[in-house]
Image (cartoon, rainbow, N blue to C red):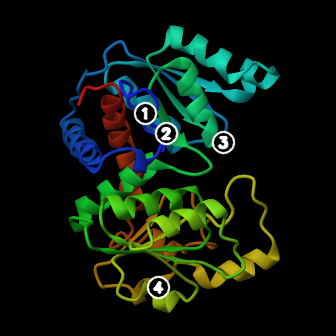
């Protein structure tokens, strides 16, 4: 856990933040969503400048944060790392110090979680994790918000993760303890479990279990989650495709869950790989579009929370 300056609120990992504060963010996001449906917005962040640094491509994170700060009365500056002096050798400390003279808060989408901490140390600004190699906390809060809206409280529910083991899963593991639900991780045997993930599972073993059999994992579950089998930078191979195929979320897999179970995917999805069109487009249980919509409202609430407006 990185605590940093106690006077500054960072949003780096779910496990860094108390459950009461995360629930405050969820409650505020729900209010802001209702407000927007009435064509109204809170101008709580008037004249606030948000800088966003992207090392990786983005659709939902970029659009939702850009609209979030704008609708709250602030402004955004978008920086692609490849087109800044970072790509020519300027250090993160130097960049962070400069940005701190222009901006009030930073959102960073990075391949290395340690960079988030470095930006905070040298800018002294609140930092939001827009995705790193070990977590994606903004996404998981949007997902939990969607579940709460469609199926009620997440507490004591059974969630199942199918497929690859990635940064989104890491945040789901943290969430399972904070929000008190069980999480079954079901993956091919040949997928190597990293030391970091093993340590996280060991820490949260009361809530998290590992499976390789989809029937055992999915039976009587309340929610089935998946993500792309091949994250950015990971190359597909015939061997991996064959190994992942039994873990595809299809109608047969969904039939193993409870009748009112839901499906989640953070997007982008590779239809025909980790999920079939019959599942992702089935509005009876697919929450995919609600998850994506809620990114906007969650980002607003996170920005307000970091800047102590809630």
Mark 4 packing: few (<14 Cα in 10 Å), some, or many (20+)? many
Q: Which residue is mark 3?
A: 112
Residue 117: image quadrant is top right
Give the alpha-carbon distance from disc 1 to disc 2, as whole Å: 9 Å
Q: Are marks 1 and 3 in contact (CB under 8 Å)?
A: no
Q: Are marks 3 and 4 in contact (CB under 8 Å)?
A: no
Give the alpha-carbon distance from disc 1 to disc 4, as whole Å: 35 Å
Of pointers 1 and 4, the one earlier in the residue sequence: 1
Q: Which residue is mark 1?
A: 10
Q: Which residue is mark 2?
A: 2
Q: Are marks 1 and 2 in contact (CB under 8 Å)?
A: yes
Q: Is residue 199 left or right of residue 141?
A: right
Which tag is nearer the camera, tag 4 or tag 2?
A: 2
Identify the residue at horizontal 32%, vertical 73% (top origin).
284
Report x, y in % for residue 178.
33, 58
Of pointers 4 and 2, the one earlier in the residue sequence: 2
Q: Are marks 4 and 2 in contact (CB under 8 Å)?
A: no
Q: Are marks 1 and 4 in contact (CB under 8 Å)?
A: no
């Amino acid at each position: 856990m990185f605590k940093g300056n106690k006077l500054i609120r960072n949003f780096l990992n779910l496990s860094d933040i108390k459950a009461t504060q995360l629930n405050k963010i969820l409650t505020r996001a729900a209010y802001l969503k209702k407000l927007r449906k009435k064509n109204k917005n809170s101008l709580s962040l008037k004249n606030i400048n948000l800088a966003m640094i992207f090392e990786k491509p983005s659709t939902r994170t970029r659009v939702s944060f850009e609209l979030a700060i704008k609708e709250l009365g602030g402004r955004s500056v978008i920086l692609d790392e490849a087109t800044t002096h970072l790509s020519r050798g300027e250090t993160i400390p130097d960049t962070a110090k400069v940005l701190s003279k222009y901006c009030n808060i930073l959102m960073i989408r990075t391949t290395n979680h340690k960079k988030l901490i470095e930006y905070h140390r040298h800018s002294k600004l609140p930092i939001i994790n827009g995705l790193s190699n070990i977590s994606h906390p903004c996404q998981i809060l949007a997902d939990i918000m969607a579940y709460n809206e469609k199926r009620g409280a997440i507490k004591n529910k059974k969630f199942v993760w199918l497929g690859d083991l990635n940064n989104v899963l890491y945040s789901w593991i943290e969430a399972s303890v904070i929000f008190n639900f069980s999480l079954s991780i079901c993956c091919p045997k040949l997928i190597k479990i990293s030391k970091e993930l093993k340590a996280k599972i060991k820490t949260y073993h009361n809530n998290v279990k590992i499976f390789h059999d989809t029937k055992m994992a999915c039976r009587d579950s309340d929610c089935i989650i998946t993500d792309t089998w091949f994250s950015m930078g990971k190359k597909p191979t015939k061997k991996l495709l064959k190994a992942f195929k039994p873990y595809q979320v299809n109608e047969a897999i969904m039939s193993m869950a409870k009748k009112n179970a839901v499906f989640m995917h953070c997007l982008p999805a590779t239809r025909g790989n980790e999920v079939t069109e019959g599942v992702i487009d089935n509005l009876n249980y697919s929450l995919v579009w609600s998850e994506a919509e809620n990114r906007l409202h969650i980002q607003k609430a996170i920005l307000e929370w970091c800047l102590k407006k809630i």
